[in-house]
Amino acid sequence: MWDSRTEAEHLTLRHTDRVLSASFSADGSRVVTASWDNTAKLWDAKTRVEQITLKGHASYINSAAFSADGSRVVTASWDNTAKVWDATTGAEILTLKGHGSGVNSAAFNPDGSRVITGSWDNTAKVWNVKTGTEQLTLKGHADRIFSASFSRDGFRVVTASRDNTAKVWDATTGAEVLTLKGHGSGVNSAAFNPDGSRVITGSWDKTAKLWDAETGAELLTLKGHTAVVRSASFSKDGSRVITASDDKTAKLWDTKTGAEVLTLKGHANSVMSASFSMDDSRVLTAGGDDNIVKIWDATPLNREFLPKEITPPRPR
């Protein structure tokens, strides 16, 4: 773990190849990581002990995420599939087949009954998790889709594409609701805020943008990174955004003013993803070529970030 002011290392999680994503379970007790070593791993978030390695994909794993109840994990892979796994045993439950190219992202809806996937085949797909059947195919992007996720109420989906746009979709009918235009290059990630009123996007144009999710109006542009923004997501209270960049940093931003609050430095190469824990007390960053994930203290107090010493038990 890294302290967000002193940059003292506390916990580091390591793969043998690039780590593309990392996320907490809802209760904050575990972390799941996705890597180009063709595995996803589940870790104890306090002790850094590796609990389970998920093996079964035939190529790179681009993303991994828990279901809301923490019982399952979904992974997305270059082998054109997504897989659903039992998060307790590591057993493979389902393989979701239907994309014509690599799958970049996969995420559960809030009640865990569906999964959304985004692919290099320019489509996103919604799947029934009980049966593994494809329910919807979202078509409208002119280039590959880098990310896809549900709103917290599960009624909408937002996708990010290399075609320089993000799109909002009706998750029941598959109808396209909005196209968010304004980035000067491909959009790597898109996510709703907790109440679904805003969308944050991160782009190859080195910026993140905040949008009105009802009207599509651009509200703020977050400028400060010196390279590609790989991911952007909200804190769980919606007051902050965290971005991850090829400039080797992650940054925290105020969502009302667009002001840069903090820069997290410590990765040796690109930061591919960054996200908050459910209680906003910690941040995860996934490194690219340095093959590691870092956990940072992010305890908020009057919008400042104070040091919090967290020392794991010594190995016996």
Image: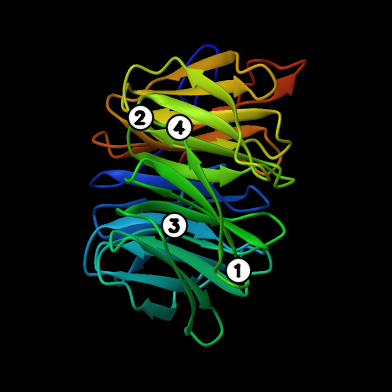
Q: Kindly identify which numbered label has been placed on residue 64.
A: 3
| Sequence-wise first label, 4 or 3 | 3
**Disc marking residue 184:** 2
Q: Residues within 10 Å of mark 1 (few under 14, many from 20)?
A: some
Q: Secondary structure at mark 1?
A: loop
Asked if 222 appears above or below 28 in the picture, the reply is: above
Left or right of 240 on screen, residue 39: left
Q: Nearer the viewer, mark 4 or mark 1?
A: 4
Frontmost of labels 2 and 1 is 2
Q: CA distance from mark 2 to mark 1?
A: 39 Å
The earlier-in-sequence mark between 3 and 2 is 3
Q: Is residue 238 above or below residue 190?
A: above
Where residue 219 sits: x, y (%)? 62, 27
Q: Which residue is mark 1?
A: 71
Along the polypeptide, which appears first: circle 2 or circle 1? 1
Q: Amino acid at mark 3?
A: Ala
The residue where tag 4 is placed is 182
Tell me whether the residue at label 3 lies in contact with that at label 2, contact meaning CB atoms closer than 8 angstroms.
no
Measured as percent of width and height from the top left, residue 313 is found at 54, 37
Report, in whole angstroms, how far the alpha carbon at label 4 lies from the one at label 3: 28 Å
How many angstroms separate mark 2 from mark 4 (CA)?
6 Å
Q: Classify 10 Å Cα crowding around label 3: few (below 14), some (14-19), many (20 and above).
A: many
